[in-house]
Structures are given as structure tokens and as C-alpha cells.
Image: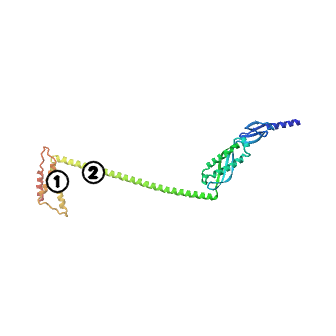
Amino acid sequence: MEIALVLFVIAVIFVVRAIKVVPQQNAWVVERLGKYHGTLTPGLNFLIPFVDKVAYKHSLKEIPLDVPSQVCITRDNTQLQVDGILYFQVTDPMRASYGSSNYIVAVTQLAQTSLRSVIGKLELDKTFEERDIINAQVVQAIDEAALNWGVKVLRYEIKDLTPPKEILHAMQAQITAEREKRALIAASEGRRQEQINIATGEREAFIARSEGEKQAEINNAQGEAAAILAVAEATAAAIRQVAEAIRQPGGEQAVQLKVAERAVDAFGKVAADATTTLVIPGNMSEVSGLIASAMKMISGTRTSPAGATASPNAVPSQMSSEWGRDAR
């Protein structure tokens, strides 16, 4: 019974040492009699008990590694407290097991030295502006050396850049001055734009007023021209009607009568004015002669229907004799 129990225990030990189940995203390095034999992949694997041994276990996942904070000196001799984080992944379990005694420490130290070298080539202002370039250069420097360790460096990120207090105060003063400068520039630009807008508005208003005045003058001129044209047309129509009336039978006698009436009215108004000195011709027949001359001018502009010139002396002579009697 004891022998069976011993055999059972030995069998269990053999099974446990012979069967290995590797989790996903893991790799186990196997040594056979102290020498590298192979790498176990995820899943069920079998070993020779007491001959094969799992020497190293590696995770193939991406590993974040916090790089300790350190002091770096820039190109312009300014000290910076730099803190970063490194992301890497084991790609070759055999090299990660035998390439370095501790690849994590090796990667950490190499990240620190590479970061100091990269920052030493840059000035203070550039270190804040070119973080992406710093990260890329650090990754490139580490990745070249980490190939022998079976490690792939994926990326490096700077978490914090802290300059000394004096530099911080100077930077803050510079930022304040720059913001005040921008505020003054913005205010001056605003005033300039305001003056431009006011001048543009006044110019457009002046142009609009001048256009309005121009259009008003054009309209007034057109109105006056239309009025003058209308008056001229009315006057011409009236003259034509008078001319037509004169051509009718008895028209000349009517004109002579009208002229005589106007002359008499004119003398009457002049005589009625007490402040006017009236000079009466010695021979009143001169008045009738004046009327006769006016009628001769009227009758001279046209001819009779038979082609003979009408005699203007009949009626004027009678009117002049009547005028002389009235004057006496």
C-alpha cells in the first residue's frame, strides 16, 4: 500500500513537471540540462521531467515603464527636471533571457542617458515646443541598442518639464509682456478699423448725398425744360390762333380797335398817376399814325387772298381823326 502511494506521488510529480500550460501573450524559455532548448508558446506543452526546466517567463504584452525623474542641461546651460514614461514590448524571449541580465534596468538607464543627450542639443524654448521630436529621437536611440535584448521600444513620452523657479518667473514675465503687447496691438487695430469704417461710411454718405443732389438738379432742369417747352407750345398755339383770327374777315379792324383801346387805357393810367408828368404830343394825329404803322406791319406780313396787299390806311385814318377830336 505504501509502495502504491509512493508510485502515485511520483506519477503526479512527473505529470506536473511534464505538462505545462502557457497563458496567452506569454512565452516561457526552456533549458535542457542547463542549455537553451526552446520557447514554449501559449497552450499545452510537454517537457521531459528532471531534464527540461522552465528557466524564464516573459510577458509579450506592451509594458509601460516609468523612467525616474532626472536633471538635464539644455544647450543654453539651463537645468530642467525631466520626467517621462517608456513603452516597450518583448519580441524575442530568448534574447530577453540571455542578452541582458536585466533588460528592464538596461532600458531604463538607456532612456535616461538618451534623453540627456537629446535635450543637451536643444535650447530651453525648443524643449517646450519640440516634445514630439525629443520623444522620437529618444525612441530611435533606445531601439537601436534594445535589439540585442529582444526588446522593441514602442514610444517615449515626456510627462513633465520643470525649469528652475527663476526661469519660471522670467518665462511668466515674458508671457505677460507678450500678452500685453498683443492686447495693445489688438486695441490699436480695433481703433484703426473703427476709423476706417467711419471714413468709409462718411465717404459713402457724401457720395450718396451728391448723387441725390445731382439727380434732384437733373429732375429740376428736366422740369423747367418741360415747363418752358409747354409755355412755348402754348404761346405758339395762341399766336397761331391770333394769326388765324386776323386772317378772318374783319380781323384787321378788330386788331386796330384792340390796339386803340390799349393805347387809350395806357394814356388813361398814366394821366391818373399824380406823381407822373405826362407829355402829350402837340399833334395828336401822331398817335393815330403810330397805330397805323403797327397795323401796316401786321398787314405787311401777309397778302390778301387775291394776292394784293391790303391797305392799312382806311381805318387808321378814321381812328386818328376820332382820336384828335377826343383829344381836343
Mark 2 vs 1, N-terminal side: 2
Q: Nearer the viewer, residue 109 or 323?
A: 109
Q: Which residue does the numbered mark 2 point to in the structure image?
A: 228
- The residue type indicated by label 2 comes to Ile
Q: Nearer the viewer, residue 306 or 323?
A: 306
SS of the residue under disc 2: helix
Q: Relative to 163, is 183 on the left or the right?
A: left
Say which quarter of the image contains residue 144: top right
Residue drawn 56% across the image and 58% down it: 177
Residue 151 visible here: no
Q: Which residue does the numbered mark 1 point to in the structure image?
A: 259
- The residue type indicated by label 1 comes to Val
Q: Is residue 175 above or below residue 243?
A: below
Q: Relative to 261, is 171 on the left or the right?
A: right
Q: Is residue 22 above or below residue 135?
A: above
Q: Position of residue 8 (x, y in %)?
A: 84, 36
Q: Position of residue 102 (x, y in %)?
A: 73, 46
Q: Relative to 209, is 50 on the left or the right?
A: right
Residue 148 visible here: yes
Distance CA(mark 2)–CA(mark 1):
28 Å
Say which quarter of the image contains residue 35: top right
Q: Quadrant location of the C terminus?
A: bottom left
Q: Residue furthest right?
A: 1
- The nearer-to-camera label among 2 and 1 is 2
Q: Which mark is residue 81?
A: none
Q: Nearer the viewer, residue 173 or 164?
A: 164
Residue drawn 33% across the image and 51% down it: 218
Crowding at label 2, few (<14), some or many (≥20) Cα neighbours within 10 Å?
few
Q: What colour scheme has been applied to the protein in the rendered image?
A: rainbow
